[in-house]
Image (cartoon, grey):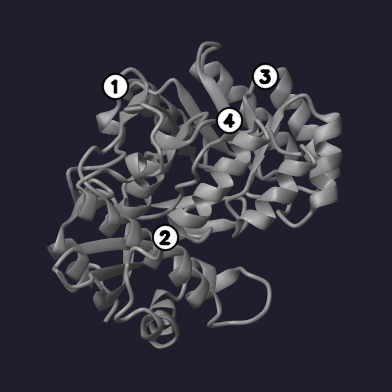
Amino acid sequence: MSRRSIARIEVHPLRAVLPKVQRTSQGDYPAIEIVVVEIETSDGIIGFGEALARRGAAGYARFIEEALVPRLIGKDPADRRALWKAMRAALSGRPGGQIVEAISAIDIALWDIAGKAADEPVHKLLGGIGRTRVPAYASSINWLDDATVEAEVATALKAGFREIKVKLGHPLKDAVARARFIRRLAGDDIALYVDANWAYDVDDAMIVGRALADLGYGFFEEPIAPHDRDGYRRLAQHLPIRLAAGESDYVASEALMLLQDRSLGLIQPDVTRSGGITETWRIAELAAAFNTAYAPHVGWSGAICVAASLQLAAAAETLRTFECMVYANPLRDAFTTPLVGEGSQLVEGMLEIPQGPGLGIEIDRAALKRHRIA
């Protein structure tokens, strides 16, 4: 019997205009971009992966085609760690940025192939913990006017969410007022979280964090710049609220720093940024070793990211909750069969884990073609 090998790799840079502009403390996002990688083996198994490429997806695609694909053709797709190292060697310097995000897409596709070859979902290949559903929170209530916020909170509650995340920014008095407003809208029985997208410095984060703790918010995500490690330590020492971060970091060695000093109560790696399933699973296992909660970051990504994140969530020992994006997104909505990670699929505040082989989804090729950057 001949050895299975990687026969073909096709790279799809995608862009979609959002039906509704999304706003954070960092600005407005009228569109999203991602890169989808399609890998076919010598015996016809096809796997799909996704890379976070919020801007310049076509540039990512060219980098993958020129720097990474030649290192993979003809190789055994099951040798995922060896292939990860081979791709990493394409660039020197500390691991991060475009190369690790690009590796993410290929690695996810290789795991999809592995699951299909074994006729098992990826979460079973990761060891499994018997979880078939995961608690999910609505993400995110926009940093827009009160009328928009009121409507978005009402929609999330009507959909059955018991957990909701809110975007906050400047000015501080408006941020605190918004947090109070949403607590009144949601009531005391709904778990509320905040994502600041590192809008604050340490002193401003102290003010907002204390207000959030008084209002019973569950975690404070990226209150300050991700590289301000000393700032996170200071906040952790003085704020009575769980700090969350990790979406802006890349590999397990970066996560280790945040876990070792106990500055985080919740770590949130993004599988399409942090090196795919191989490296993100290392982070989830580190979280378990440090008894720290884990919640996959999804954000403004596509359906493949959602599916891969659900597979990780199904197997992660310290999973706390799952980010379910509730805004319309053409790169997620109706992009796969079956639908994956949609708020409309919520049952008692939980989402089902895809149980099909690999990522458990099939890509709509018409949608893939429709959103491809020429």
Q: How far apart are marks 3 and 1 (CA)?
A: 27 Å
- Can the viewer see residue 248? yes
Q: Residue 286 shows which numbered tag? A: none
Q: At 75% across and 31% down in the image, what residue appears?
A: 209
Q: Is mark 1 on a helix, strand or loop?
A: loop
Q: How far apart are marks 3 and 4 (CA)?
A: 10 Å
Q: How far apart are marks 1 and 4 (CA)?
A: 20 Å
Picture coordinates of residue 161 (x, y %)? 39, 23
Ranked by sequence position, the earlier of labels 3 and 4 is: 4
Q: Name the residue under label 3.
A: 215
Q: Name the residue under label 2.
A: 30
Q: At 31% across and 63% down in the image, what residue appears?
A: 16
Q: At 37% across and 59% down in the image, what residue appears?
A: 108
Ranked by sequence position, the earlier of labels 3 and 1 is: 3
Q: What residue type is labelled 1?
A: Val
Q: What residue type is labelled 3?
A: Leu
